Amino acid sequence: MLNFLNGIKSLISGSSNQDHAKGINRIANTFAVLKSQNRKALIPFITAGDPNPEMTVQLMHQLVQSGADIIELGVPFSDPMADGPTIQRSSERALKHHISLNNVLDMVAAFRKVNADTPVVLMGYANPIEALGYEAFSSKAKSCGVDGVLIVDYPPEESSEWVRCLEQHGIDAIFLLSPTTPQARIQQVAKMARGYIYYVSLKGVTGASHLDLQDVSDMLQRLREFISIPIGVGFGIRDGATAKAVAGLADAVVVGSRIIEEIEQSSDAELLANVGSLLSALRKAIDENSSNA
């Protein structure tokens, strides 16, 4: 058994560039290693280009150093309808620097020059993808080292061509589910989704703060009747206690608005240290579950 676990770990920590060129799935490997350690994934979200383009790759490395297992990198968009005011402001700051989808892909490529292991998931809206085209986007995303893509305004019922194009390039199609998702859509997503499911634990937009853990627990139980891949929970996770509680229920904890607030409130000189300190505290709280198991 030990040799098996070490073998999984070597997939992540070994000569990774060569492995990933052969199509090794970073997201699946990450969850496999965490499961073997009885640990849960910490998935922070930042917006590419916020507070400025020069900081993004540095921030990504800081997130990993402070305990991130997967990074969700937001593609800034002028009308981020699913996002609350905090993440909307992060998009506005990034767009002041004219950050495009191609710029975001270039940032992932720069990150990959140093880190070949940590999965990167792009999160955004359909418009920039449509402008580039499915094939052109998927090809460049793969070559830059993107592992998954979550497009919030692609309904699963209309996404078969999109998912097929991503699959052809070895990229996971990530989907959102929420407390109001009807069962037919849950079953549709269960067939199409790869990597992990992002369960939005609150009704409304990102950054809201009324998290009912019993509701989350009940919904995850329902989702797992249909879904076999890991489920991450986000929205409303603002501190270590909530992160620990959610980690006791889900396979991953997604934190976005709270990190963006830290970025927003920090000077450039303090930014990396402040975000790192926040993430380290969340990581420690989440890992208390496995140490107590």
Image (cartoon, rainbow, N blue to C red):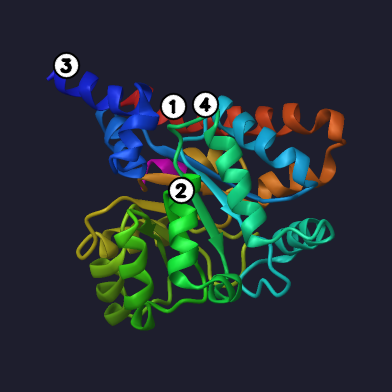
- Which of disc 3 and disc 4 is earlier in sequence? 3
Q: Position of residue 15 (x, y in %)?
A: 35, 23
Q: Could you classify mark 3 by the number of other residues whose Cα lies within 10 Å: few (under 14), some (14-19), or many (20 or more)?
A: few
Image quarter where the N terminus lies is top left
Occupied quadrant, residue 282: top right
Whether residue 241 appears in magenta in the rendering, the answer is no
Q: Is residue 128 above or below residue 276?
A: below
Contact between labelled residues 1 and 4, with CB atoms less than 8 Å apart: yes
Q: Residues in magenta?
A: 245-249
**Between marks 2 and 1, how big is the CA–CA gap?**
37 Å
**Between marks 4 and 2, how big is the CA–CA gap?**
34 Å
**Between marks 3 and 1, how big is the CA–CA gap?**
23 Å
Under mark 4, the amino acid is Lys
Which of 151/176 is in front? 151
Image quarter where the C terminus lies is top left
**Between marks 4 and 3, how big is the CA–CA gap?**
25 Å
Secondary-structure class at tag 3:
helix
Q: Which residue is mark 4?
A: 284
User: Of helix, strand and loop, which mostly describes the magenta segment?
Assistant: helix
Under mark 1, the amino acid is Glu
Q: Which residue is mark 1?
A: 288
Secondary-structure class at tag 2:
helix
Front of the two marks 4 and 3? 3
Q: Which residue is mark 3?
A: 2
Q: Is residue 117 above or below residue 170?
A: above
Q: Which residue is mark 2?
A: 143
Residue displayed at 77% across by 40% down: 54
